[in-house]
Image (cartoon, grey):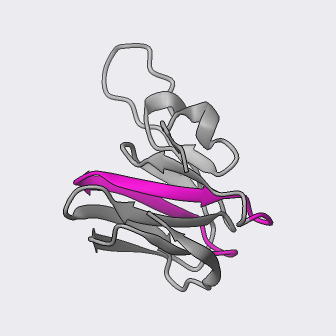
Amino acid sequence: MKIKKLDHKSIKPYGWIIDREFIKDYGQGDKFGVLLKERSAGWRIGYLILRKKRFEKLESHPDSLETFEPVKGKTIITLAPNKRPDKAEAFFLDRPLVLKKGVWHNVAAISKECEIKIFENIEVKTEYYYLQEGIS
């Protein structure tokens, strides 16, 4: 599978990159911008230490947005549209991003280990799509 670079255009079907694009900055003073608002039952923050190198399955959270914020190491994220887990694309996870509800996804380490900060609903329903052949 070809690994793509994360940019605003390539990630649009799946979610948003977390960066300054959403802030109206005129170059003076501090600025704060809201990327999105989720009116749910609450959020939780997770921290993933990732060592696996293969994708055996994809997962989807139909009721939760989810962030993936790389902290350390080199990571690949695989993403597929809500109704088409068989149409996965791989991206270097070199920027923080938000996934839309229902997007199929998984991560794998390129370096020995990676660390990723994750925000998601406090309760998360997870569905799985098992790949016939794992992806390395």
Q: Residue at x 57, y 45 (%)?
A: 16
Residue 127 visible to the viewer: yes
Taking the view exactly as shown, the residue that stands out farthest to the right is 83
Taking the view exactly as shown, the residue that stands out farthest to the top is 27
Q: Is residue 136 left or right of residue 29?
A: right
Q: Nearer the viewer, residue 24 or 9?
A: 9
Q: Residue at x 77, y 63 (%)?
A: 84
Q: Nearer the viewer, residue 41 or 3?
A: 3
The spot of residue 72 in percent (x, y) is 21, 54
Q: Residue at x 49, y 71 (%)?
A: 120
Q: Nearer the viewer, residue 130 or 17?
A: 130
State the extent of the magenta-drawn residues as a range. 59-84
The spot of residue 17 in percent (x, y) is 50, 42
Does residue 104 show up magenta in the picture? no
Identify the image quadrant of residue 44: bottom left
Q: Residue at x 37, y 13 (%)?
A: 27
Residue 59 visible to the viewer: no
Q: Would you place residue 7 above or below residue 74 in this image?
A: above
The spot of residue 45 in percent (x, y) is 37, 72
Q: Is residue 115 left or right of residue 1?
A: left
* The C terminus - image quarter: bottom left
Identify the image quadrant of residue 107: bottom left
Q: Would you place residue 81 above or below residue 28 in this image?
A: below
Q: Would you place residue 26 above or below residue 83 in this image?
A: above
Q: Would you place residue 65 above or below residue 9 in this image?
A: below
Q: Is residue 28 left or right of residue 39?
A: left
Identify the image quadrant of residue 76: bottom left
